[in-house]
Image: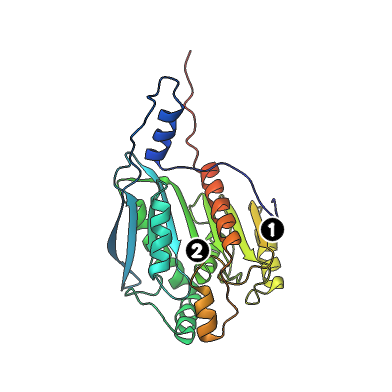
Protein backbone atom coordinates (compact mmCIF):
# COMPACT_ATOMS: atom_id res chain seq x y z
CA UNK A 1 0.00 0.00 0.00
CA UNK A 2 1.13 3.50 -0.71
CA UNK A 3 0.12 6.42 1.47
CA UNK A 4 0.69 10.05 0.58
CA UNK A 5 -0.05 13.04 2.77
CA UNK A 6 0.13 15.89 0.31
CA UNK A 7 -0.34 16.62 -3.36
CA UNK A 8 -0.24 13.91 -6.01
CA UNK A 9 0.53 14.81 -9.61
CA UNK A 10 -0.78 13.44 -12.86
CA UNK A 11 -2.59 14.38 -16.02
CA UNK A 12 -6.17 15.39 -16.62
CA UNK A 13 -8.67 13.29 -18.55
CA UNK A 14 -10.61 15.62 -20.83
CA UNK A 15 -13.95 15.04 -22.43
CA UNK A 16 -13.77 13.39 -25.82
CA UNK A 17 -14.77 16.58 -27.60
CA UNK A 18 -12.19 18.64 -25.72
CA UNK A 19 -9.51 16.04 -26.37
CA UNK A 20 -10.29 16.16 -30.08
CA UNK A 21 -10.09 19.93 -29.94
CA UNK A 22 -6.63 19.69 -28.40
CA UNK A 23 -5.49 17.37 -31.17
CA UNK A 24 -6.81 19.78 -33.76
CA UNK A 25 -4.97 22.71 -32.23
CA UNK A 26 -1.74 20.72 -31.98
CA UNK A 27 -1.71 19.68 -35.63
CA UNK A 28 0.94 21.47 -37.68
CA UNK A 29 -1.43 21.96 -40.59
CA UNK A 30 -4.26 23.25 -38.40
CA UNK A 31 -6.00 26.43 -39.59
CA UNK A 32 -5.07 29.75 -38.03
CA UNK A 33 -8.52 29.99 -36.43
CA UNK A 34 -10.43 27.00 -35.02
CA UNK A 35 -14.14 27.08 -34.29
CA UNK A 36 -14.93 24.19 -31.98
CA UNK A 37 -17.73 23.18 -29.66
CA UNK A 38 -17.46 22.02 -26.09
CA UNK A 39 -19.52 19.32 -24.37
CA UNK A 40 -23.32 19.39 -24.26
CA UNK A 41 -24.24 18.15 -20.80
CA UNK A 42 -27.73 16.74 -20.43
CA UNK A 43 -29.37 15.26 -17.34
CA UNK A 44 -32.23 12.89 -16.78
CA UNK A 45 -34.01 11.57 -13.72
CA UNK A 46 -33.82 7.81 -13.27
CA UNK A 47 -36.13 5.86 -11.02
CA UNK A 48 -34.96 2.48 -9.79
CA UNK A 49 -35.88 0.02 -7.05
CA UNK A 50 -33.72 -1.19 -4.19
CA UNK A 51 -34.82 -3.27 -1.22
CA UNK A 52 -38.42 -2.96 -2.36
CA UNK A 53 -38.27 0.86 -2.29
CA UNK A 54 -38.26 3.46 -5.05
CA UNK A 55 -35.11 5.56 -5.43
CA UNK A 56 -34.74 8.64 -7.59
CA UNK A 57 -31.29 9.25 -9.06
CA UNK A 58 -29.83 11.50 -11.71
CA UNK A 59 -27.85 10.65 -14.85
CA UNK A 60 -25.56 13.31 -16.34
CA UNK A 61 -23.69 12.85 -19.63
CA UNK A 62 -22.26 14.64 -22.64
CA UNK A 63 -24.80 14.25 -25.43
CA UNK A 64 -22.11 14.84 -28.06
CA UNK A 65 -19.69 12.18 -26.84
CA UNK A 66 -19.51 8.94 -28.80
CA UNK A 67 -18.61 5.42 -27.80
CA UNK A 68 -18.68 3.79 -24.39
CA UNK A 69 -17.18 5.86 -21.58
CA UNK A 70 -16.29 5.30 -17.93
CA UNK A 71 -19.17 5.42 -15.48
CA UNK A 72 -18.98 7.24 -12.15
CA UNK A 73 -21.33 6.74 -9.20
CA UNK A 74 -21.60 9.86 -7.04
CA UNK A 75 -22.95 9.56 -3.50
CA UNK A 76 -24.32 12.67 -1.83
CA UNK A 77 -23.60 14.33 1.51
CA UNK A 78 -25.87 13.66 4.47
CA UNK A 79 -28.18 16.39 3.11
CA UNK A 80 -29.30 14.00 0.35
CA UNK A 81 -29.26 14.25 -3.44
CA UNK A 82 -29.57 18.01 -3.62
CA UNK A 83 -28.41 20.73 -6.01
CA UNK A 84 -24.79 20.41 -4.87
CA UNK A 85 -24.61 16.71 -5.79
CA UNK A 86 -26.29 17.45 -9.12
CA UNK A 87 -23.78 20.20 -9.87
CA UNK A 88 -20.84 17.87 -9.23
CA UNK A 89 -22.41 15.23 -11.48
CA UNK A 90 -22.75 17.76 -14.28
CA UNK A 91 -19.13 18.89 -13.84
CA UNK A 92 -17.87 15.34 -14.29
CA UNK A 93 -20.19 14.74 -17.25
CA UNK A 94 -18.67 17.77 -18.95
CA UNK A 95 -15.32 15.97 -18.82
CA UNK A 96 -16.63 12.97 -20.71
CA UNK A 97 -17.85 10.64 -17.96
CA UNK A 98 -21.33 9.21 -17.58
CA UNK A 99 -22.30 10.03 -14.01
CA UNK A 100 -25.08 8.73 -11.82
CA UNK A 101 -25.88 10.70 -8.69
CA UNK A 102 -27.23 8.05 -6.34
CA UNK A 103 -30.22 8.38 -4.03
CA UNK A 104 -29.23 6.51 -0.86
CA UNK A 105 -32.25 7.68 1.16
CA UNK A 106 -34.99 6.58 -1.20
CA UNK A 107 -37.79 8.60 -2.69
CA UNK A 108 -35.38 11.42 -3.54
CA UNK A 109 -35.58 12.65 0.06
CA UNK A 110 -33.35 15.51 1.14
CA UNK A 111 -32.81 17.18 4.50
CA UNK A 112 -32.52 20.83 5.43
CA UNK A 113 -31.90 20.56 9.16
CA UNK A 114 -28.84 18.70 10.56
CA UNK A 115 -31.03 16.61 12.89
CA UNK A 116 -33.02 15.31 9.93
CA UNK A 117 -29.85 14.73 7.91
CA UNK A 118 -28.28 12.87 10.81
CA UNK A 119 -31.34 10.67 11.17
CA UNK A 120 -31.35 9.82 7.46
CA UNK A 121 -27.63 9.01 7.28
CA UNK A 122 -27.58 7.03 10.55
CA UNK A 123 -30.49 4.91 9.38
CA UNK A 124 -28.57 3.97 6.23
CA UNK A 125 -25.22 3.22 7.85
CA UNK A 126 -26.75 1.28 10.74
CA UNK A 127 -28.06 -1.31 8.27
CA UNK A 128 -25.06 -1.86 6.04
CA UNK A 129 -26.39 -4.90 4.11
CA UNK A 130 -29.35 -2.79 3.01
CA UNK A 131 -27.07 0.14 2.14
CA UNK A 132 -24.79 -2.12 0.10
CA UNK A 133 -27.79 -3.52 -1.75
CA UNK A 134 -29.01 0.00 -2.50
CA UNK A 135 -25.61 1.04 -3.87
CA UNK A 136 -25.35 -2.10 -6.00
CA UNK A 137 -28.80 -1.45 -7.47
CA UNK A 138 -27.61 1.95 -8.63
CA UNK A 139 -24.39 0.41 -9.94
CA UNK A 140 -26.43 -2.04 -12.02
CA UNK A 141 -28.49 0.82 -13.46
CA UNK A 142 -25.42 2.78 -14.52
CA UNK A 143 -23.61 -0.27 -15.88
CA UNK A 144 -26.61 -1.15 -18.06
CA UNK A 145 -26.46 2.16 -19.90
CA UNK A 146 -25.41 1.68 -23.56
CA UNK A 147 -22.93 4.58 -23.38
CA UNK A 148 -21.16 3.17 -20.30
CA UNK A 149 -18.14 0.89 -20.35
CA UNK A 150 -19.06 -1.53 -17.57
CA UNK A 151 -15.43 -2.49 -17.07
CA UNK A 152 -14.41 1.08 -16.27
CA UNK A 153 -16.38 2.17 -13.23
CA UNK A 154 -15.55 4.25 -10.16
CA UNK A 155 -17.35 5.85 -7.21
CA UNK A 156 -16.93 9.11 -5.35
CA UNK A 157 -18.65 10.36 -2.24
CA UNK A 158 -18.92 13.46 -0.07
CA UNK A 159 -19.28 13.41 3.72
CA UNK A 160 -21.83 10.62 4.32
CA UNK A 161 -21.29 9.59 0.71
CA UNK A 162 -17.57 9.22 1.40
CA UNK A 163 -18.37 6.67 4.10
CA UNK A 164 -20.59 4.78 1.67
CA UNK A 165 -18.01 4.49 -1.12
CA UNK A 166 -15.17 3.64 1.29
CA UNK A 167 -17.23 0.82 2.74
CA UNK A 168 -18.07 -0.35 -0.77
CA UNK A 169 -14.34 -0.64 -1.38
CA UNK A 170 -14.17 -2.79 1.77
CA UNK A 171 -16.73 -5.14 0.20
CA UNK A 172 -14.43 -5.66 -2.79
CA UNK A 173 -16.84 -3.90 -5.17
CA UNK A 174 -16.06 -4.16 -8.92
CA UNK A 175 -14.74 -0.61 -9.23
CA UNK A 176 -11.49 0.77 -10.58
CA UNK A 177 -11.32 3.48 -7.96
CA UNK A 178 -13.05 5.01 -4.96
CA UNK A 179 -12.56 8.63 -3.88
CA UNK A 180 -13.81 10.09 -0.61
CA UNK A 181 -14.11 13.83 0.02
CA UNK A 182 -14.26 14.71 3.74
CA UNK A 183 -15.97 11.36 4.29
CA UNK A 184 -16.61 9.58 7.55
CA UNK A 185 -13.99 6.84 8.14
CA UNK A 186 -16.37 4.61 10.08
CA UNK A 187 -16.19 0.94 9.10
CA UNK A 188 -19.63 -0.63 8.64
CA UNK A 189 -18.54 -3.81 6.81
CA UNK A 190 -18.25 -6.72 9.22
CA UNK A 191 -15.89 -8.81 7.09
CA UNK A 192 -13.79 -6.54 4.84
CA UNK A 193 -12.50 -8.01 1.59
CA UNK A 194 -9.59 -7.07 -0.68
CA UNK A 195 -10.30 -4.31 -3.18
CA UNK A 196 -8.59 -4.52 -6.56
CA UNK A 197 -9.03 -0.84 -7.34
CA UNK A 198 -7.44 2.32 -5.96
CA UNK A 199 -8.63 4.19 -2.86
CA UNK A 200 -8.09 7.92 -2.28
CA UNK A 201 -9.16 9.46 1.03
CA UNK A 202 -9.18 13.28 1.06
CA UNK A 203 -9.63 14.84 4.47
CA UNK A 204 -9.44 18.29 6.02
CA UNK A 205 -6.69 18.42 8.62
CA UNK A 206 -8.88 20.77 10.69
CA UNK A 207 -11.96 18.56 10.40
CA UNK A 208 -13.22 18.11 13.97
CA UNK A 209 -15.96 15.73 12.82
CA UNK A 210 -13.42 13.11 11.74
CA UNK A 211 -11.46 11.40 14.51
CA UNK A 212 -7.84 10.80 13.56
CA UNK A 213 -7.86 7.41 15.27
CA UNK A 214 -10.81 6.32 13.13
CA UNK A 215 -9.03 7.53 10.01
CA UNK A 216 -5.87 5.64 11.00
CA UNK A 217 -7.90 2.51 11.68
CA UNK A 218 -9.50 2.68 8.25
CA UNK A 219 -6.15 3.15 6.51
CA UNK A 220 -4.69 0.25 8.51
CA UNK A 221 -7.62 -1.93 7.42
CA UNK A 222 -6.96 -1.17 3.76
CA UNK A 223 -3.28 -1.82 4.37
CA UNK A 224 -4.03 -5.24 5.87
CA UNK A 225 -6.03 -6.05 2.74
CA UNK A 226 -3.14 -4.92 0.52
CA UNK A 227 -5.30 -2.26 -1.09
CA UNK A 228 -3.41 0.56 -2.76
CA UNK A 229 -4.47 3.59 -0.72
CA UNK A 230 -3.68 7.30 -0.75
CA UNK A 231 -4.51 9.53 2.22
CA UNK A 232 -4.33 13.28 1.70
CA UNK A 233 -4.76 15.74 4.56
CA UNK A 234 -5.41 19.38 3.59
CA UNK A 235 -3.93 21.82 6.17
CA UNK A 236 -6.49 24.15 7.71
CA UNK A 237 -9.43 22.61 5.83
CA UNK A 238 -12.60 21.92 7.82
CA UNK A 239 -15.38 19.43 7.22
CA UNK A 240 -17.29 19.86 3.93
CA UNK A 241 -14.40 21.87 2.46
CA UNK A 242 -15.58 21.20 -1.12
CA UNK A 243 -19.04 22.70 -0.73
CA UNK A 244 -19.37 26.50 -1.26
CA UNK A 245 -22.57 26.40 0.82
CA UNK A 246 -20.71 25.14 3.90
CA UNK A 247 -20.06 28.57 5.40
CA UNK A 248 -23.74 29.50 5.29
CA UNK A 249 -24.78 26.21 6.86
CA UNK A 250 -22.09 26.56 9.50
CA UNK A 251 -23.44 29.96 10.49
CA UNK A 252 -27.08 28.92 10.36
CA UNK A 253 -26.76 25.72 12.39
CA UNK A 254 -23.57 26.36 14.38
CA UNK A 255 -21.70 23.52 12.68
CA UNK A 256 -17.89 23.13 12.33
CA UNK A 257 -18.00 23.34 8.53
CA UNK A 258 -16.12 25.57 6.12
CA UNK A 259 -15.47 25.95 2.42
CA UNK A 260 -11.82 25.94 1.33
CA UNK A 261 -11.31 26.92 -2.30
CA UNK A 262 -7.72 25.68 -2.47
CA UNK A 263 -8.54 22.29 -0.96
CA UNK A 264 -11.62 22.03 -3.16
CA UNK A 265 -9.62 22.63 -6.35
CA UNK A 266 -6.72 20.41 -5.29
CA UNK A 267 -8.92 17.48 -4.26
CA UNK A 268 -10.91 17.66 -7.51
CA UNK A 269 -7.68 17.59 -9.53
CA UNK A 270 -6.40 14.63 -7.52
CA UNK A 271 -9.56 12.73 -8.43
CA UNK A 272 -9.23 13.56 -12.12
CA UNK A 273 -5.58 12.50 -12.10
CA UNK A 274 -6.57 9.18 -10.59
CA UNK A 275 -9.33 8.60 -13.12
CA UNK A 276 -6.97 9.37 -15.97
CA UNK A 277 -4.65 6.69 -14.64
CA UNK A 278 -7.10 3.90 -13.85
CA UNK A 279 -9.28 4.37 -16.94
CA UNK A 280 -6.47 4.14 -19.48
CA UNK A 281 -7.49 2.04 -22.45
CA UNK A 282 -4.99 -0.85 -22.89
CA UNK A 283 -3.01 -0.65 -26.10
CA UNK A 284 -3.78 -3.42 -28.55
CA UNK A 285 -0.87 -5.62 -29.50
CA UNK A 286 0.20 -5.48 -33.11
CA UNK A 287 0.82 -8.78 -34.86
CA UNK A 288 3.88 -8.92 -37.08
Residue 68 falls in image quadrant:
top left
Could you tell me residue 206's position as x and y percent? Answer: 68, 71
How far apart are labels 2 and 1 at the CA level? 23 Å
Residue 72 falls in image quadrant:
bottom left
Whether 220 is drawn above or below 61: the answer is below
Residue 147 falls in image quadrant:
top left
On screen, residue 158 versus residue 17, left or right, reads right
On screen, residue 239 versus residue 31, left or right, reads right
Could you tell me residue 193's position as x and y percent? Answer: 58, 59
- Residue sitting at the far top: 288
The residue drawn where x is 69% and y is 50% is 2
The residue identified by callout 1 is 224
On screen, residue 194 versus residue 5, left or right, reads left
Classify 10 Å Cα crowding around label 1: few (below 14), some (14-19), many (20 and above): few
Q: Earlier in the sequence, mark 2 or mark 1?
A: 2
Mark 2 or 1: in front is 2
The residue identified by callout 2 is 157
Depth order, front residue of 254/182: 254
Q: Which of the labelled discs sits on residue 59, or is there none?
A: none
Could you tell me residue 128's position as x and y percent? Answer: 49, 72
Whether 249 is drawn above or below 74: the answer is below
The residue drawn where x is 49% and y is 42% is 13
Q: Is residue 194 visible?
A: no
Local SS, label 1:
helix
Classify 10 Å Cα crowding around label 2: few (below 14), some (14-19), many (20 and above): many
Local SS, label 2:
strand
Whether 283 is drawn above or below 9: the answer is above
Could you tell me residue 132's position as x and y percent? Answer: 46, 67
CB contact under 8 Å: marks 2 and 1: no
**Please, which colouring scheme is shown?**
rainbow
Question: How many numbered marks, from 0 up?
Answer: 2
Amino acid sequence: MRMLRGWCAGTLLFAQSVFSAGQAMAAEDAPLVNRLEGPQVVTETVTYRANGEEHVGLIARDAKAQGRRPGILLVHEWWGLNSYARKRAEQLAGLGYVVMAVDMYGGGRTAEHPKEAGAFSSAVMSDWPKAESSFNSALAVLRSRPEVDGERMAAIGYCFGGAVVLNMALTGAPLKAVVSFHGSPSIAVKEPEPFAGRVVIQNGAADTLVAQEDLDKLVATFQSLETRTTLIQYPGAKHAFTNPESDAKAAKYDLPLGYDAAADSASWQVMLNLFNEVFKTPKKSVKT
